Amino acid sequence: MSGFSEEVHTYWQSQMIQGSIIHLDEVFTLVSNPSLKEMYKVMILEMTNKHTMAVATPCVVEDLKLKELEEYTVEVFREAISSCKIELHTPDYIYYLPNNRIIPAKPIQDSITFRPLSEEHDVEVFRAFEAKCSEEDLDGAYVSLKHWVVYGAFDGEELIGASSAYLWNGTRLADLGVIIGEDYRDRSIATRLVQAICMDIIDKGYVPQYRCQTDNTASVALAEAVGFSLFGEWEVILAKE
């Protein structure tokens, strides 16, 4: 997992390998972590080197008798958790920039400009943009003018795309969202917009983090176009109500 910043490794180690190690080998690690957030009953992180780390709260470990498994593999672990009333959420790909650096795209000659947005000056233009977007796109992008850093893409005076970042779980990782107006897609605007906000985040001393569902081919393509590299595939399992 070389090439990613120390903040990335420190955060995921704190989530996945702190606590009591139940099993550890070359391909699978299972940990009981009493400090795991209550909302995260179980987490699974499959790294790009194909090593899978799984962590669970002590209550889940006890309920599923995870210390008594006859064999410790990813398949056996998944079989064990499937027997309980838990819900497996759609996996996310987690991306970071190698060495936390951005390589700007080649300039494109068009009328699109990019700049930071603020609640003080851009509420009206942001609301007008949101009104043109579908609820599905807004929910999926999770872009907010209230976030820590916000950037907009403009065609003249019209806001036609936005990207925002908030600090992830109290770390120096800045989790990104992006949305582009339907009439402006497939023009490399999203790539340039995300690169612009990433450069700002890096200049502030933080680490851009990009997440998307594994079946979202458009988001995967955007991550690669921006210059992100895949860190791993992350699954969260929550207790059912």
Image (cartoon, rainbow, N blue to C red):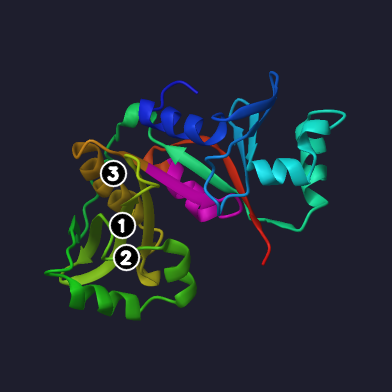
Q: Which mark is residue 164?
A: 1
Q: Mark 3 and 1 residues: CB-CB less than 8 Å, in contact?
A: no
Quadrant position of residue 56? top right
Tell me the magenta residue range: 209-224
Quadrant position of residue 198? top left
- Circle 2 SS class: loop
- Circle 1 SS class: strand
Image position, residue 213 (x, y; %) = 56, 53
Q: Say which amino acid is labelled 3.
A: Cys
Image position, residue 197 (x, y; %) = 26, 49
* Residue drawn at x 78%, y 44% as measured from the top left: 64
* Residue drawn at x 47%, y 48% as measured from the top left: 211
- Circle 3 SS class: helix
Mark 3 Cα within 10 Å, few/some/many (few <14, many 20+)? Answer: many
Relative to 161, is 21 on the left or the right? right
Mark 1 Cα within 10 Å, few/some/many (few <14, many 20+)? Answer: many
Image position, residue 102 (x, y; %) = 30, 35
Q: Which mark's residue is nearer the viewer, 3 or 2?
A: 2
